[in-house]
Image (spheres, grey):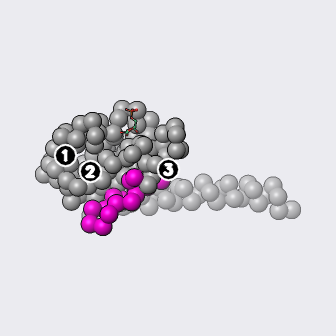
C-alpha cells in the first residue's frame, strides 16, 4: 500500500497533526510524519516532496499556520495529491492560514480542508487509496454506516423527548 506523508510546518502543529495520525493508524494505512518548513527549512521541504513519489508515497498532508505556504510549496515540487490543513493560530483564528492554503493559483492544486481539519485530510487521503484498494473502501463504508447509526440514535432520543 502507498504511504501517506504528514508534513507540519512546526512541531507546534503536532496537536492538529495527531488527528490525522490517529485516523491513518485506525485504518491501518502506513504513514510518515515530518517537520519541514517552507521558510525555515525550504531545502528539506523541497527534497522530501520532490522524491516523495519515488519513495512510495501516495499523497501528502501538509499542515501549517499563519502565512501558510507549506502546502503550496510542497505541491510545487510533486505531482502527488497534496491535502492542505490550515492550522489555527492566535491572531486571526486560522483565517490567515485558510486563505494562504486554499487560494492556490491555477495549475498547482492544494485540496484544502477546514481549519484544523486534519482528520478529514486523512480520510480524504484514505479515499484516494481506496480508489484501488477495496479493503480500505469497505472500511470507509463501515465507518460511514457507524456514523449514521450514531446520528439516528441521537435523533430517536431527541424525538422521544420532544415529540409527544
Ligand atoms: C508556521 O508557523 C507553522 O506551521 C506554525 O503553525 C506557525 C508557528 O510556528 P512556530 O513559531 O510555533 O514554530 O510555519
How many marks on residues? 3
Which of the two residues, 36 or 1, is positioned nearer the viewer here? 36
Within-10-Å neighbours for mark 1: few <14, some 14–19, many 20+: many
Question: Looking at the rendering, which quadrant does residue 43 occupy?
Answer: top left
Q: Are marks 1 and 2 in contact (CB under 8 Å)?
A: yes
Indicate whether residue 106 is drawn in magenta. yes
At horizontal 86% and vertical 62% (from top left) the residue drawn is: 164
Q: Is residue 60 left or right of residue 117?
A: left
Q: Nearer the viewer, mark 1 or mark 3?
A: 3
User: Where 128 sits versus 23, above or below?
Assistant: below
Residue hosting label 3: 95
Within-10-Å neighbours for mark 2: few <14, some 14–19, many 20+: many
Q: In this view, does 43 lie to the left or right of 102?
A: left
Which of the two residues, 99 or 19, is positioned nearer the viewer here? 99
Q: Measure how far apart labels 1 and 2 are at the Cα level.
A: 8 Å
Q: What stretch is highlighted in magenta?
A: 100-117
Q: Which mark is residue 46?
A: 1
The local secondary structure at tag 3 comes to helix
Residue hosting label 2: 73
Q: In which quarter of the image is ligand 1?
A: top left
Amino acid at each position: 500500500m502507498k504511504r501517506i506523508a504528514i508534513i507540519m510546518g512546526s512541531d507546534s502543529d503536532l496537536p492538529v497533526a495527531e488527528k490525522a495520525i490517529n485516523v491513518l493508524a485506525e485504518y491501518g494505512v502506513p504513514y510518515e510524519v515530518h517537520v519541514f518548513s517552507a521558510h525555515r527549512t525550504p531545502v528539506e521541504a523541497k527534497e522530501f516532496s520532490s522524491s516523495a513519489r519515488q519513495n512510495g508515497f501516495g499523497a501528502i498532508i501538509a499542515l501549517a499556520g499563519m502565512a501558510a505556504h507549506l502546502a503550496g510549496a510542497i505541491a510545487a515540487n510533486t505531482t502527488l495529491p497534496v491535502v492542505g490543513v490550515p492550522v489555527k493560530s492566535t491572531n486571526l483564528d486560522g483565517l490567515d492560514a485558510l486563505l494562504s492554503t486554499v487560494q492556490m493559483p491555477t495549475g498547482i492544486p492544494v485540496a484544502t480542508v477546514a481549519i484544523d481539519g486534519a482528520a478529514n485530510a486523512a480520510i480524504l487521503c484514505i479515499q484516494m487509496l481506496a480508489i484501488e484498494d477495496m479493503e480500505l473502501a469497505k472500511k470507509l463504508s463501515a465507518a460511514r454506516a457507524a456514523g449514521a447509526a450514531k446520528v439516528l440514535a441521537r435523533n430517536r432520543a431527541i424525538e422521544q423527548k420532544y415529540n409527544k
